[in-house]
Structure formats: structure tokens, C-alpha cells
Amino acid sequence: MTTRDVADLSQKIVDSEGNEEFHISNAWLTEIENSESIPSILQALQLSVVYHVKFGDLLQLFGVDVQRNQQAPD
């Protein structure tokens, strides 16, 4: 999948949801791939949908271990 493909899929979801905060541009995705940028929570969610990856697994790529950071209920 190219960065252009991701941008196009992202735009379809933006149009469907009516929320520009989900937008992922081709240039911005390249910045992420080059470790020059970190996605917002909505953009990370968008990437997990586009790439068909579990959200927690995607967060691990950015140094967030969801399993480790979960607290047991009292």
C-alpha cells in the first residue's frame, strides 16, 4: 500500500465521518515513516483502521504499551 493509497482511504473515512481530524496526508504519513512526526489519537486510530492493525499494536510502534499501562480494577 502506498502513502497515496493511505491518504485516499483516509479521505474516504474523513468524508464518511465528517471530521477532518482523521485526515492523513501523503506528506504527513511520510513524516511518520521517517520518525519526524507522531500521530494524534484520532490519526493513530485512522492508521489502525486503514492498515487493519489492532489499535494497541499500532500504539506500541510509538512506544505506548497498552497492556503494561493498564491497571487492575479495585
Image (tube, rainbow, N blue to C red):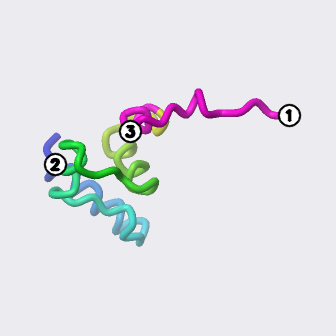
Q: Quadrant of the C terminus?
A: top right
**Given contact means CB atoms under 8 Å apart, are the residues at marks 2 and 3 in contact?**
no
- The residue tagged 2 is 3
Position in image of residue 21 (x %, y %): 39, 66
State how far apart marks 2 and 3 are (Cα).
Answer: 18 Å
Discs 1/2, front:
1
| Callout 3: SS | loop
State how far apart marks 1 and 2 are (Cα).
Answer: 44 Å
User: Start and end of the magenta stretch?
Assistant: 57-74
Q: Nearer the viewer, residue 6 or 15?
A: 6
Mark 3: amino acid: Phe
- Quarter of the image for residue 57 reads top left
Mark 2: amino acid: Thr
State how far apart marks 1 and 3 are (Cα).
Answer: 29 Å
Compared with residue 22, is residue 49 higher up or lower down, i.e. above or below?
above
Report the residue at 17% width, 40% height from top: 1
- Residue 74: mark: 1
Position in image of residue 73 (x %, y %): 80, 34
Q: Residues within 10 Å of mark 3 (few under 14, many from 20)?
A: few
Is 23 inside the magenta-drawn segment? Answer: no
Is 61 inside the magenta-drawn segment? Answer: yes
**How many discs appear?**
3
Report the residue at 36% width, 52% height from top: 39
Mark 1: amino acid: Asp
Compared with residue 11, is residue 56 higher up or lower down, i.e. above or below?
above
| Callout 2: SS | helix
Report the residue at 20% width, 51% height from top: 31
- The residue tagged 3 is 62
**Given contact means CB atoms under 8 Å apart, are the residues at marks 1 and 3 in contact?**
no
Image side of residue 38 versus residue 65, left or right: left
Position in image of residue 67 (x %, y %): 58, 28
